Image (cartoon, rainbow, N blue to C red):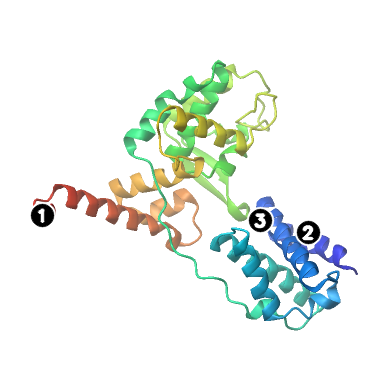
Amino acid sequence: MNLGQLINQWQLGLGALNRSPNTIKAYTQDFFDFKCFFEDYHNTQLTIENFKTVTPQDIRAWLLAQRKKGMNTRSSARGLAGMKSFTQFLLQREILEDHAFFHTRSPRLQKTLPRPISIEQALMMNDTIQNMSECLWVGLRNQALMQLLYYTGMRISEALNLNQDSLQDDQFITVIGKGQKTRQVPIIDSIREGLLTYLKIQPFSNTPNSPVFYGEKGKRLQAAIAQKVLRDFRRANGMPESLTPHALRHSCATHLMQSSHDLRGIQELLGHASLSSTQIYTQIDELSMMNTYKAAHPRAKK
């Protein structure tokens, strides 16, 4: 079996492990990035035989080349994860026994706090974003989507993959998250009514298997369009550049943490597999409290 056939088998295996299409695409791109580097670095075509001979020096040179191209540490870490995934696949197929990628440490990632918007900014966005479109149903779609992201903390991919049968329950939406795991997300009446109002006037099919969010040509709305809607909105209204669909998820979690401090409940709402992923919002809450203290306390002002 040649290298191309092995790559196809690896991709199929990633799909069987419920890796997302984006992850499979990114890992594949990382592999071909390494392949191009190796072939240029050694002036020879990459084959399965010389892949076995990759050295730590080759890997360090590849990572250095990535940094010179402007790739950040997080992207380099993902690239290593992709190559380790491919190498692990070869190990499972008994094509190799050991490899330099297994012994390469990922670069240390600096933990960065999410950048939520304020409650006032979120409410202003929810009340006015529909006015960015001259088409009534598109404006209501944009409003319904952004309200759903902010009030439920869904990932943009989760929201855009919803079908209309997910709205049959008055109080919960069934969401398919990472790893095809399902969870029940509560939905308040006003958000559900906004969704139903938009669906009543949009011009496309309203069947159980139809998408909740349509693009203007009648296909499922793409994330790039939703991102552009927010980009145009924030620039027209002087909102921070950090206002993205994912920032609405962070904002939902941050504002809930500030009012409830229910870490487990927020973990379930967001669909985090690990509580440690949710605990970052306690740091944001503590930072907010400290900033308030410094701004208000007479001693802190000195």
Kindly identify which residue carries mark 1: 302
50 up-or-down from 135: above or below: below
Kindly identify which residue carries mark 2: 12
Spatial CA span between label 2 and label 1: 62 Å
Amino acid type, label 3: Thr
Residue farthest to the right, as pictured: 1
| Residue 201 badge | none
Looking at the picture, tell me which residue is in the foreground, 258 or 54: 54
Looking at the picture, tell me which residue is in the foreground, 122 or 294: 294
Q: Is residue 266 visible?
A: yes
Residue 176's spot in the image, x, y percent?
Answer: 59, 47
Q: Going from the N terminus, do you reach mark 2 or mark 1 first? A: 2
| Residue 23 badge | 3
Mark 1 lies on a secondary structure that is loop
Amino acid type, label 2: Leu
Image marks 2 and 1: residues in contact by CB distance under 8 Å:
no
Residue at image position (85%, 77%) is 49
Q: Quadrant of the C terminus?
A: bottom left
Q: Going from the N terminus, do you reach mark 3 or mark 1 first? A: 3
